[in-house]
Amino acid sequence: MRLTNYTDYSLRMLIYLGSMKEDKLTSIQEIADAYQISKNHLMKVAHELGKKGYIETIRGRNGGMRLSKLPKDINIGKVIRSTEEDFNLVECFDSERNACIISPACHLKHVLHEALSAYFEVLDGYTLADLIVNDHKLRQLLFKH
């Protein structure tokens, strides 16, 4: 299973914001510079994370963004479920497009469904706080200036 860049960037943005000192605001450009990724991609990510309630954005001259929840209240499994479009690991997971002729007798889809459930069970056991536990080292890497 591979996560999209959108999900990767969403998680990275949350890690960055979670590693900041409380109540400090940052810009999309600062995050883009820290990770050396496109500001344009991060603009969409920030907008969606704001709509989903993970971050708050403040407009204006002294504006920026920050987490809208405590890191311990941001569940990683939930974030990934909200940022990925689908989890159709194989064709037969999509009932509308499934053309596999062995689907009615195949047990592979059950095995893969069990594996996907286990994947999310692990992710559901972690919060953003768990990902930023070594925040001193993260700050050294992210906030070089």
Image (cartoon, grey):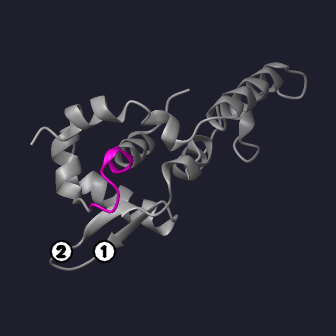
Above or below, 59 against 85 in this view is below
**Could you say which disc has been placed on residue 41 in the image?**
none
In the visual, does 61 lie left or right of 22?
A: left
In the visual, does 145 lie left or right of 119?
A: left
**Could you say which disc has been placed on residue 58 in the image?**
1
Above or below, 41 against 113 in this view is below
- Residue lying at 21% horizontally and 53% vertically, measured from the top left: 39
Q: Position of residue 115 (x, y in %)?
A: 73, 23
**Could you say which disc has been placed on residue 62 in the image?**
2
Given contact means CB atoms under 8 Å apart, are the residues at marks 1 and 2 in contact?
yes
Above or below, 108 against 33 in this view is above
Kind of element beneath mark 1: strand
**What stretch of residues is rendered in magenta?**
16-24
Q: Is residue 2 visible?
A: yes
- Residue lying at 79% horizontally and 26% vertically, measured from the top left: 114
Front position in the image: 35 or 106: 35
In the visual, does 130 lie left or right of 104?
A: left
User: Distance from label 1 to label 2 (Cα)?
Assistant: 8 Å
- Mark 2 closeness class: few <14, some 14–19, many ≥20 residues within 10 Å: few
Task: Please state which amino acid type lies under the numbered disc 1.
Answer: Ile
Q: Is residue 102 visible?
A: no
- Mark 1 closeness class: few <14, some 14–19, many ≥20 residues within 10 Å: few
